[in-house]
Amino acid sequence: MSFLGLLSYLSFLIQICFFTVSIAAGLYYLAELVEEFTVTAKKIISWIVILTTFIYLTFIFTENFSWLMIGCGIFAQGVHGLILKNFPYIKFLSIQFLSGVILLLVNHYFAFVYFQQNYHTFSEVMAYFTLCLWLVPFALFISLSANDNVLPTSNERTPLLRDNDVVTNYFSSKKKLGLLTLFDYAKDSILPQRNKKSF
């Protein structure tokens, strides 16, 4: 192996690192946008669900997909629409969320079986997986962090302790789980901390 061949492996590892950092930064930025503009995010995700449903309906006339594959995809979009009813509140143990996860797995199985039996180009397969299977769940995954900082609409504990108001009580007692919380934890634990000098 030549020296240039070794350098190509090294450059490939560096490219993977840059690609990973770019994806993490993009996800963090998108999660911040969703947290800041939850109403707009709900509208965008709703339009993505409608677009994906329209794509599935177009497949009836243009492609040779099985009725089970198309029906399961349309049903999954209906479940995604039900998840959006309470947006940005997403309950992980709700029937809608669990049904969405199960339908995602079932749709992947149908897609793998179909594309294994019928030849399509790689770009066509990636178009189906990206637009029909991954886009809406990915958007919902990013929007999980929006649930962390939504202000409560009613008192969660009665009576409140002396000087605590509803907002202080909510933020101090609730454990937050979400994409931004994960990124903040990774930032604090992995990246080195800079100490500011005071003069």
Image (spheres, rainbow, N blue to C red):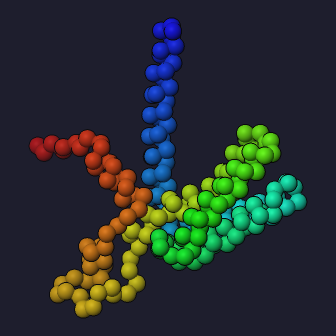
Of residue 182 and residue 107, the one placed in the foreground of this image is 107
Can the viewer see residue 26 in this picture? Answer: yes
Can the viewer see residue 131 in this picture? Answer: no
In the image, taking residue 30 as reference, residue 47 lies left or right, namely: right
- Residue 80: % across, % down: 62, 69
- Residue 85: % across, % down: 57, 77
Quarter of image, res 43 = bottom right
Image height of 130 relative to 12, above or below: below
Image height of 194 relative to 84, above or below: above
In the image as oriented, which residue stretches furthest toward the right? 61
Quarter of image, res 45 = bottom right
Image height of 75 relative to 158, above or below: above
In the image, taking residue 183 as reference, residue 97 lies left or right, namely: right
Residue at 23 percent across and 88 percent down: it is 160
Quarter of image, res 169 = bottom left
Residue at 34 percent across and 54 percent down: it is 184
Residue at 52 percent across and 73 percent down: it is 87
Of residue 100 and residue 15, the one placed in the foreground of this image is 100
